[in-house]
Amino acid sequence: MKTLRLFPLELGRLLRSRLTWLVMLLTVLGPVVGLYLYQSAVSTMNSLYLANPAIAGGIAGGILFGLLAILELDRACRSRVDVLVDAVVSPLTAALTRLSALLTTAVLTTTLTMLVWLPISAGLIGAVFDMVDYVLAYLLFMGLALPLGVLAAASAYQFTRRADLSLVVFAAFCGLSLTVWAENWQLCWLNPCVWALSDDFSNFRIYRSVAYMRLTWLAGLAGVWTLSYLCIRQYGKGALGSLARSIRRAYRPVIAVTLLACSGTAYAAQPMVDNSNPDQTAMTFFEIPYLDGVICTGRSAQVFPDVSAGTVRGKASYSFENSSGQEQKVALGVTPGYTISNVRANGETVPFSVGDYQEFNEVLLEVTLPAEAQIELTMEYGGFPREDQNLSDSQGSTEISGTYLQLENAALSPRLLNVLPDENYYPTEMEITLPNAMTAIPFGSSRAEVVAEHEDGTKTWRWEDIGTGGILYAGDYVREDIQAGGMTIELYYGRKHQDIMTQANAADAVRDVVEYCAAHYGTLSFGSGETLKLIQSRIAGGGYAAGGASLLDESDFTAANLNRAEKGSGDSEVMIHELVHQWWGLGNMFDIPEPDSPWSAEGLTVYTTYRIVKELYGEEYARTHYIDQWQQEVDDYYLNFYVRHPEYLEMLPEAERLRISNSLSGMRQYSEMPLKLLKAEQLVGGEDAMDQILYDLFNREIDPMYPYLTYDEFLSACGLTEEDLNLG
């Protein structure tokens, strides 16, 4: 009760301190660092103008409040009145009161920061600003960092009773998070692993991950603080003597042990990431031999995502013909985090086991089939899908919400591993029940149709497919059908992005690109002939394609990306640039370029964009907005100090060296390479000759062992050497 009486007095004293207001002011200004310096999240508007500022604010605030905690706890010692203060108020009561006041001040600072940055963030993010994202990002990325900093610093001081040593310990603890632990999502307590936030869809999966990490550390540091609380010096005794006296009240050590145990258990039993083999060359599941005398004649599944909890449940069915006359053990891949239950063959319960070994985000499920000729195997599955630990620092792909979900292969239904198909190649019928606002889009040529509408505001979608797996995208999508290149292009993009796509003339850009590239280079090999789905995905770091569908990463169409001058002079031209990557990037892949090489998908894409713009807007426009700008960039490049004196570049700090190198590398890909291609066009005899060369390269026979289009192949097709394309 004495703590409650002292708390308002201590909080009032703390808020009258100029040092406190300085710390609060610097914390409120902390997000500015995320706009210009600390930029761990990339690509989207929410990443640039929400995640980065919130994370930077959390780093700054956590450190500042930790320093404030040490200075406040050491105030009585610095003033040499600690003996008098301890005589008036118990050191234990004083410590608890100070902690409560510091934590309350942290909450007030977080609230003030959110109020100050709300209009700024809304203005910077623009049309895709979302209040839920804003609140969650600042609460989780920034808000919880402040009490963690207070607890860590206060614990260090209460253990050591020395401000200088506490500062060293706290600095080391912060440094570990920012360096050694920076890529370990569970350990980076100060700077959470957030590689990107989606603009068009939800981000609850990454919020859950950060919240889990923060709460784990909160319990752990609260336990450490409670332990340090027991070591607070009293009655003239040292740390151990004070500890021996404080533990006489049993509830105190019980609280400390309980908090530490909860934190340790939460760390060890985290549900977010699997235990996949870190060896990316391991192919154990693909090496399982096929069963003799067993074939699969069909499969089906009914899937029921819980969009509020981010979980999935379903029922899968497999039809087998067993001509071996004996029991067989069928192997299936299951997403870690799912549990398997009610496994039956022809209505009878059969034995099954789920292994411990995990590989490429799958765990092995083995089911014993009876020695019967016709077998119908059914099972129920469900849970919270985990992500591959090899990608744990870039979580978010298993997003399941009312606006977006992506279920791949074993996450959609258990995947067959060791049973061959009949001549129909695993005929499949899938059903999924989703909220009314969501559209189901199977990746590939399959088409989903609504087969039932339910009173709870959901719809059941059904589609047919083949194969052992499958990929489903679903979300709050807008669909536009575009006739181009002799086929129908179905363009799907997020509803929140509709204004931006309209402003960028997305439909016209798709039509222009498809008609131009199909006429000059050939049709895309992954088109189904009559239709092609272009699906905008949640931020994924790239796209891919398969028969009948291609994925467009949302980062390609953010407002920030659509204003990148090196890709085009306007929104619609950058849209054209990104769509050309369907030919140069997906239709023909490029290996990761060397840092000093201009050859990449970007060079051919920029050149093709220039050719399309020239055809649409005329030669003068294309020269002014493309060729002249390329030449200016190249001229500036060769005047750059570090290009003329590379020995000085090596002397710079690594971070600055990488920043400059990346900038120069981007110029070579976006400006120098298009100029080289323009020179090659002149040397080979003009645009028609260049188009024929590119047509032949696009349609060449691809080596599956190295499917990339190389610079040497291009030069050979042109009959040129690297020296022929030197600029100057």
Image: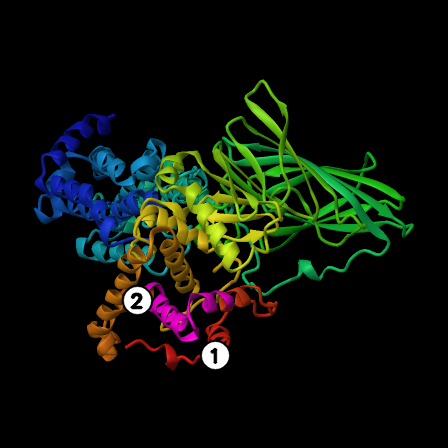
| Horizontal side of residue 381 vs 306, given as left or right | right
- Is 634 left or right of 527, judged from the image as shown? left
User: Mark 1 touching mark 2, by CB under 8 A?
Assistant: no
Quarter containing the C terminus: bottom left
- Is the residue marked by circle 2 packed among few (<14), some (14-19), or many (20+) residues within 10 Å? few
Q: Tag 1: residue type?
A: Gly
User: How many numbered marks appear?
Assistant: 2
Asked whether residue 267 appears in the rendered view, the answer is no
Say which element carries label 2. Answer: helix
- In-front residue for pair 505/121: 505
Q: Amino acid at mark 2?
A: Leu
Q: Position of residue 118 (x, y in %)?
A: 24, 34
In the rendered image, residue 107, in percent from the top left (x then y), is placed at: 25, 34
Q: Nearer the viewer, mark 1 or mark 2?
A: 1
Magenta residues, start to end = 668-692
Which residue is identified by label 2?
A: 658
Is residue 213 left or right of 278 when viewed as pictured? left
Task: Return the residue found at the far right.
Answer: 325
Residue 675 lies within the magenta run: yes
Name the secondary structure under disc 1: loop
Residue corresponding to mark 1: 719
Please tell me which residue lies in front, 207 or 215.
207
Q: Is residue 468 magenta?
A: no
